[in-house]
Structures are given as structure tokens and as C-alpha cells.
Image: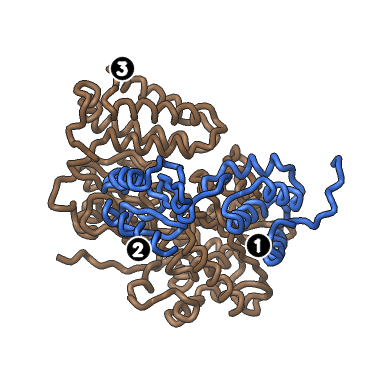
Chain colours: A brown, B blue
Amino acid sequence: MSAPAYEKVILRNLQDPGYRGTLAEYRARGGYSGLPKALQLQPQEVIDLVKQSGLRGRGGAGFPTGLKWDFVPKDLALTKYVAINGDEGEPGTFKDRQLLEQEPHPIIEGTVITAYAIGAHVAYIYVRGEFVEGAKVFQRALEEAYAAGFLGKNILGSGFDLDFYMHRGAGAYICGEETGLLESLEGKRGQPRLKPPFPAVKGLFGKPTVVNNVETVSNLPPILVGGPEWYAGIGVPPKNTGTRIFSISGHVERPGNYELPLGLPLRELIFEHAGGIRGGRQLKAVIPGGASSPIFTPAHLDVKMDFDSVAAAGSMAGSGGVVVMDETTCLVRVARVIAHFFAHESCGQCTQCREGTAWLHKMLTRIDEGKGRPEDLEVILDVCDNMKGKTICVLSDAAAMPIESYIKHFRDDFEHHIRGGACPTGMA
Amino acid sequence: MGVAPAATPPLAGFRPETREFMAQIVSRYPTRRAGLLPLLSLAQEEHGYLTVEAMEQIAAFLGLSPTEVYETASFYTLLHFRPIGEHLVQVCTNLSCALLGARPVVEHLKQRLGVREGETTADGLFTLETVECIAACGGAPALQVNGRYYERMTPSAADALLDRLAGER
């Protein structure tokens, strides 16, 4: 049985098995034809067009991209920056890595469009330190784009200048948070900043800055070429338009990146596109939007996978990382793994997060090892409650909310561990 | 501030082409400090890890105190302050990899190499680390060796990989 096919916007060229993502190949398939269209418009017209397309950020928060740009002061004399977020680290997500390694030019073209719209003449892309191959490919693509006149002085004879530099991370999840990213770009520890002021007003080096995700800007060239009405016709208009890349992993037959229109049922993603549960086993749980998102159960299979529907169902569409778990999965172990992650990645500046993530990890490890105490679950829920809405950034909430959801939906797994001391699933 | 720097050229401990590249990198930013992370990564590439001397020279070059450099560097997990093995084996133990058998792979590697997580073999060939999500969930369980990805790992696949890497010497 073949899965339903949909129009692709970002991974279109990669359907061609010989495609390598070089400048010549990208141009041969219509690449860099969105940029000249943007340069013929006034910057505000580009912003308005992106607003009309309905594009929302693909990094995690789903904020409307055009609106984010519109917050940047219009004063032409002000120095402004664009920072592209290629620091993908949300567990369960592997789409930005694919774009960097295999389709770098739409990122560059989209970045020039972004910079033109807000009036920035310097852009940086923050590429995760682990992405050695991605950084190599992207650097080559930058050099190709400079040589062809898509970057540098007087781009395509428009009079618009842009320098675009790659900046590599060195291992820290929190640098994917936009103000953590800016701190890191400035050569500091990647500790998020208090907001407001938001980056659009006071960002990189204290100047107005737009921070956009790699996948987000990859949508811009096709939007310029196809027009905002075309893009807004994909997905669930008016607020959940376009496609997104779902990274599907875990216990499915065909894990991978799937670019699909927003708003398809979760059931279709898992059972048609990703081939269903491995070995015909039963579905137990699904993380719908990266490790930070509260968990879904089989009762959520009809939830439509767009920003607002996933939120209405009690979770978040987040980074598009869908992690599927079958009946052999122990949610205590899942909780322990996730708590370890957040304890490891907490930057340490807020007490609730630094202490809370460490305590969650300690207690969940204890339960997983069969040494849980009857009162542990209530203490964990109390710790979670004290971690939410009280910190500089949302890492603390992102740690607490999933753990709460595991206990809410799979309390039996936890109680069994606490009572009996052993795991019924025997997960390795 | 205080003592005048010694009469050695800046970044004296690096190869001339590295020095030149470092200066070029710093010119991309409006502040010198913004060059810190890229320079530390270059220093690590050249020396294998961050020596105290390298951090001091970078500090002087960027107009920072050595403490500022160290407190920043210590935030980042890819930066090392001690020599590491020729092959840095980083096994992902985050969720998708854990679901598909990362733990048995780690336990097997610990046994085979005779090290704990974070340690280097006596012959200096391998350092074993467990790491958080490396964005290879579609090929879980996954690991990286010196930044290169190896996916769908099992204890026996990991053995074959290590045999091959050890033989490359």
C-alpha cells in the first residue's frame, strides 16, 4: 500500500535520487528565482507577502514569520542582523541536519530574502557543532553563492549588500533557544536572556535581530515564486499553512523525514507514511513535537498535526519530531531518559530549572532502578509544578510538562515500578 | 591592564595559516569576543584539545582575560580540556536511540574497550562518550566517530566499526 502523495515545497528537489544540492543543480530546478522577485519589491511588501502566506516558524514556537520581521524597527540607519538557527538539538528531530547537508541553497536564498525585508547587511548561521558534514556542505554553498553574486555587494544588481557567515556551535542544546543562540554568537556562555526586550528590538550585539530556523527560511523562495495565495492554500488556512518536515522515529517500520501538509491526522503520519508500528506491534505512546512536547496516547491518533490542533489536544507541534513507542516501551525509562537530557542541558542560571531538572532525574532514576518510594510521584508532580512559568527561558517548562504528561497518561507504569520494583516491559 | 604582554607574537602557539584564519574569522564580527567559539574550535583541531597556553593566547588575542575564556569554553560539551583518543566515539543515548537499543551498544563498548563513559583507552586510540540527541533518530541507534555518523548500531556492528578504525592506524 502506498502512502498518499502531497506536493512538496522544501524537499521537492531531493525526490530526485541523483540530486546533490549544488548551486548548478538547484538553479537548474528553478532555484534563486524567488530572490530576484523579492528584490523587485519594497522591503515592506516582502514582509506583507510573507504575512499573507501565513508562514509560521518551524523551529518550535510556531510564531508567524512575517509578524516577527515586522517588529524590527524600520529605521534605515540602524544596524540590524539576521541569525539563522541551525542548532537543531530537540530530541527526535533531524530535519535541519538533512537540509544543511543536502539542500543548503534554499537556506541561503531564504536568508537573503529575510535580510532584504528587514534591512540587514550581515547574517550569521549558527550551525550545531556536531554537524561536521552539514557545515562542510554549507560552507561550500556559501562560497558558490558569493561567486555567483547571490551574496556580497550589490546582489543581482539591486544595490543590496549582504555578507553571510557560518558560525559553528560547540555542543549545548540551549543555544537553540534564540537568545541563548545570540549569547553564544557573541562568544559567551549560551545562557538565555530575559525578554523583553525581544531580539527584534535588541538582539545580536544589541541591535535589532531576526532569528529564523533553517526550515522556516527554506520556505521563502517557493513562497516568492508561487505567491502567498498558493502557499496559504496548502495545509489548514488561514493559520496553519504550508508543509512541514516531520521527523518520524522510534518503533515504526520506515523512520525518516516526511514533508507533509500541515493538518494531516497523526494516524496517517504513523500508519501510512512511516509504515506503521514495527513488527505489527501495538502503539503505546507518541511524542508529537520533540522531547519538550507532552505525550499522546492511541486516543490521540485523530489529532490533526498542525500548530493549533496539537495545542488544543494538550501538547505542542514543536519541532516536528514525532517519536513513536510500541507496547514494549516503559514510560518510566522514557521519563528517565528525558529527565537526564534536560538536567544535562539546563544552563544553570535559574534555580527552578537547575535544581528541578536534577531532582527529576534523580527520582526517576530511583524509580527506574526499583527503589522508588510511594510518595515519589506526588513529589515529582510538585517539583514539576514549581518549574513552570518561573524561569528566564522555557527549558524548565519543557522538562516539566512532558514528565507530568507521562505520569498523567501512564501512571500504571510508574506505580508498578514503585510497588513491584521491576519493569513489566523489561526494556533494555 | 597591568603587565604589558611579553614580546612574543600573538597566537604564537599556532601554525601561521591557523593564525591567519583566526584573524580573518574575528573580522567577521563587530566585537572581537564573538570570535571566541570559532577560535577555540580551531585551537582544538590543531592541538587535539584545549591547552591552557592556547586559551591564554586566544584570550590575549581577543582582549579577554583567561578566566573569561575558560568560563565560556567550559559551557560547551564539544570542547575538551584533556587529551582525548584518536577516535572520539560518541554514542547517542537519547530517546529514539534508547528505544532501539543504544544501552546494550554502550555496555558492549565499555566492556570491549575496558573504559567507563568519558574515558580513553590506555593506547590512546578510543575515547568513549555517551551524548544527547545527535539528530540521527531516523537511523537509531546512532553514534558519531570524530563527527562522522554511523547508524543502526548493534553490539556486533559497533565491534566491526571499531575493528576497522583500529586497523586504519
Residue A209 is marked as none
Q: Residues within 10 Å of mark 2 (few under 14, many from 20)?
A: many
Say what secondary structure mark 3 lies in.
loop
Residue A267 percent coordinates (x, y): 21, 52
Say whether residue B96 is left or right of residue B26. Answer: left
In whole angstroms, how far apart are the C-alphas of marks 3 and 2? 49 Å
Indicate the chain on which mark 1 is placed: A
Say what secondary structure mark 2 lies in.
loop
Image quadrant of residue A350?
top right
Which tag is nearer the camera, tag 1 or tag 2? Answer: 1
Do the dots labelled 1 and 2 sit on one chain?
Answer: yes
In whole angstroms, how far apart are the C-alphas of marks 1 and 3? 55 Å
Q: Earlier in the sequence, mark 1 or mark 3?
A: 1
Check disc 3 and report the residue beneath it.
A375
Callout 1–callout 2 Cβ contact below 8 Å: no
Image quadrant of residue A126?
bottom right
Q: Amino acid at mark 2?
A: Ile
- Count the marks: 3
Q: Residues within 10 Å of mark 1 (few under 14, many from 20)?
A: many
Q: Nearer the viewer, residue A35 or A402?
A: A402
Task: Work out which quarter of the rendered image holds the N terminus of chain A and state it.
Answer: bottom left
Residue shown at 57% from the left, 33% from the top? A349
Indicate the chain on which mark 3 is placed: A
Which tag is nearer the camera, tag 1 or tag 3? Answer: 3
Q: Amino acid at mark 1?
A: Val
Check disc 2 and report the residue beneath it.
A234
Say whether residue A88 is left or right of residue A147. Answer: left
Q: Earlier in the sequence, mark 3 or mark 2?
A: 2
